[in-house]
């Protein structure tokens, strides 16, 4: 196996163009290296992009937040811009393993691995994440929803590099959060992870709702049926709408009959209720 260390995006896409399907990007290595050691991954070339400093920034660009692909999960937990504008993403990053893993693992790697249990993906989905992809042929912008195909599979082409992630910040009357249920503790993989973003009018009516799940047999995804039952309901007083949304989330688990699927269906309504109450508490000055 060839090890290729690159120092720029241009060098990275050159190597990707050269190796094609035989090359594999190495960033934090928290997914790639264990797969290689277990014999599940044997590329002809590992292309190490960890030295590209230009992929480590977090900035505001044109009203959205741009996050470089090499930004670590620990930085997402601690960065004030992320904590204020994207609290669900900060909470999701904090839920990934121990701090040692968070210090090494990158947001780009978490996205491209596309694990069904990836905590950051629901938080990114409710923030309408857009991915900036680059290759020798040019640049391509794709939504995270379109990018995620199934667990472990994405729309990333063999010659493309994920350069940055753009996410929509919270509005003045928005609130969001992320919660997960693991087998024993927050360091476990998510049996189910749930992200919620609500947009509320000054009169207290829910004008926008985004809900996304991870865990299970499918890729992380939004749940439009649960979102739609919240629209037009009273933010702080419509228990029926919030209960119906929780039931829709349970139905979104699908027809699986495995013990984990049954458990997800059982816990999702309560998990959604906890997260909704947290969001309600975040928005001041809204009449119920």
Image (cartoon, rainbow, N blue to C red):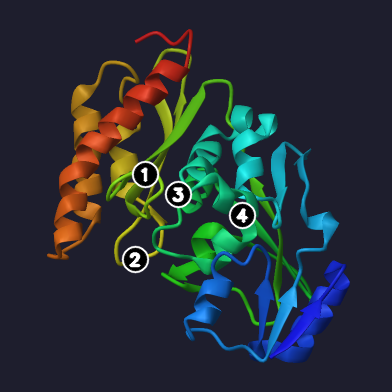
Q: Which quadrant holds the C terminus? A: top left
Q: Quadrant of residue 256?
A: bottom left
Q: CA distance from mark 4 to mark 1?
A: 18 Å
Q: CA distance from mark 2 to mark 3?
A: 13 Å
Q: What residue is shown with label 2?
A: 218
Q: CA distance from mark 1 to mark 2?
A: 14 Å
Label 4 near label 3: C-beta < 8 Å?
no
Label 3 near label 1: C-beta < 8 Å?
yes
Q: Secondary structure at mark 3?
A: helix
* 2 or 3: tag closer to the N-terminus: 3
Question: Which is closer to the viewer, label 4 or label 2?
Answer: 4
- Give the camera-side residue of 184 and 16: 184
Q: What residue is shown with label 1?
A: 194
Question: Which is closer to the viewer, label 4 or label 1?
Answer: 4
Q: What residue is shown with label 3?
A: 122
Label 1 near label 4: C-beta < 8 Å?
no
Question: Where 39 sits versus 235, above or below?
Answer: below
């Amino acid at each position: 196996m060839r090890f290729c260390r690159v120092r720029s995006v241009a060098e990275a896409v050159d190597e990707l163009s050269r190796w094609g399907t035989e090359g594999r990007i190495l960033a934090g290595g928290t997914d790639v290296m264990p797969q290689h050691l277990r014999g599940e991954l044997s590329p002809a070339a590992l292309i190490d992009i960890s030295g590209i400093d230009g992929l480590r920034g977090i900035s505001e660009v044109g009203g959205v937040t741009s996050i470089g692909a090499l930004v670590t999960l620990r930085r997402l937990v601690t960065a004030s811009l992320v904590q204020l504008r994207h609290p669900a993403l900060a909470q999701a990053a904090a839920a990934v393993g121990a701090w040692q893993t968070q210090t090494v693992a990158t947001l780009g790697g978490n996205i491209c691995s596309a694990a069904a249990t990836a905590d950051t993906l629901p938080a990114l989905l409710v923030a309408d994440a857009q991915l900036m992809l680059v290759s020798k042929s040019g640049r391509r912008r794709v939504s995270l929803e379109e990018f995620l195909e199934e667990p472990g599979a994405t729309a990333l082409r063999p010659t493309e590099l994920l350069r940055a992630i753009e996410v929509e910040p919270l509005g003045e009357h928005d609130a969001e959060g992320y919660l997960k249920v693991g087998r024993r503790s927050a360091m476990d993989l998510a049996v189910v992870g749930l992200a919620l973003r609500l947009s509320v009018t000054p009169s207290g009516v829910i004008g926008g709702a985004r809900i996304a799940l991870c865990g299970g047999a499918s890729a992380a995804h939004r749940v439009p049926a649960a979102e739609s039952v919240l629209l037009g309901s009273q933010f702080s007083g419509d228990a029926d709408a919030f209960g119906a949304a929780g039931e829709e989330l349970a139905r979104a688990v699908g027809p699986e009959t495995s013990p984990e699927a049954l458990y997800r269906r059982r816990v999702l309504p309560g998990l959604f209720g906890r997260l909704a109450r947290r969001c309600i508490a975040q928005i001041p000055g809204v009449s119920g």
